[in-house]
Image (cartoon, rainbow, N blue to C red):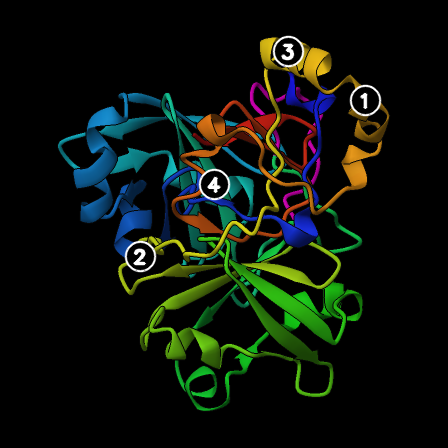
Amino acid sequence: MTPGFHQRLNMDALSWIDVGQTKFPRFLRFLKPDEISKDELKIPEIFVTEYGGEIPSKITLQFPNGHEIHAIYKREDKSVSKLGLILTEFNLRPDSVLLCCYKGNGNFLICILNDGNSEIDYGKITSRPSGELYRQDAKGGVGWKFLSLVIGSIHRDGGADIPSKFIKRFGNKIPEVLIYVLGNGEVIPGSYSKADKKLYGLLALFKKKLVNLFNILMFTYCGNGRFELCIFDKNGIEKTLEAREADINDNVIIIESDDTEESDESEDSDDSEDSDDSETDVNCAVTNDENAGDVKGHVIKLYVPEIYLYENIIFHLNTFGRFVIIGL
């Protein structure tokens, strides 16, 4: 049953169960001259150990604009062919950075950071992509990424330099007061200084012992003063963050199945008029203890546009207007 026809959860007071660090495993690759000469992209040893057995020999490299390149995964060499074609297609330099996200079934999403560690403009294509597109807003900066190495400024005053290319494109779109959303859903308040061209408020990462020197921070702007913040170790592997524990505080509204709804109608017919306004009721208590048993254990807080809970299944309405299962 589509969760969109059921009760919606208000995100200002929502707590929900841990869904892990990211939906798909990711890693960063800083291109090296020897890789370019051999026309091969090396995959980190740790990533191969964890997921290499699931990758078939024939793979597809998809880019945010929908462009696709068919390549070969060489299991023995732990590498991917057609690196030269990627460089030629997007006119990249040898010092480019690739963000590789394995989506399963031999499909990789490749994001390219080139202009001072900020994401490139991929341009438009006329062909129809076979998979779901990762859309970007070229005017508002939504979906665009940049990297920052954890040294110096971040360690001293919690400030991260924003690449000049990103500032020129989207600097006037970023408000002075903002938030960082970590991979485990934790929200950290921050600020943006137009004068310094920096993001501040990152000392909290050190206090929580989430980062070390020479870790890599990847910022993805989501609009409305919200940055998704991912942390990579010095090997380029994305860190897995532990979920925060919080009290449920009766803020989760359980979406019940059809059978349960019918029984509730007979028992609580007097309250049927009140249920029409349930979409805006943010203090509705969890009434189905059997369904809510798993939810009361370990929960974290996350700010996203749409979240639905139906029979212990948590759905996220993504930016493509599709429902994605993100928790059980």
Q: How far apart are marks 4 and 2 (CA)?
A: 19 Å
Q: Distance between the residues labelled 3 and 2?
A: 67 Å
Give the residues in magenta: 121-133
Q: Earlier in the sequence, mark 4 or mark 2?
A: 2
Residue designated by label 2 = 33
Q: Distance between the residues labelled 3 and 4?
A: 49 Å
Residue designated by label 1 = 270
Per the image, label 2 sits on a secondary structure element best described as helix
Q: How far apart are marks 4 and 1 (CA)?
A: 54 Å
Q: Does the magenta stretch include residue 182?
A: no
Q: Residue at x 26, y 53 (%)?
A: 34
Q: Depth check: give the residue in front, 125 or 259.
A: 259
Name the main secondary structure of what is drawn in magenta. loop
Q: Depth check: give the residue in front, 228 or 122.
A: 228
Q: Which of marks 3 and 2 is nearer the N terminus?
A: 2
Residue contact at pointers 1 and 3, CB within 8 angstroms:
no
Residue 146 placement, left or right of 272: left
Q: Earlier in the sequence, mark 4 or mark 1?
A: 4
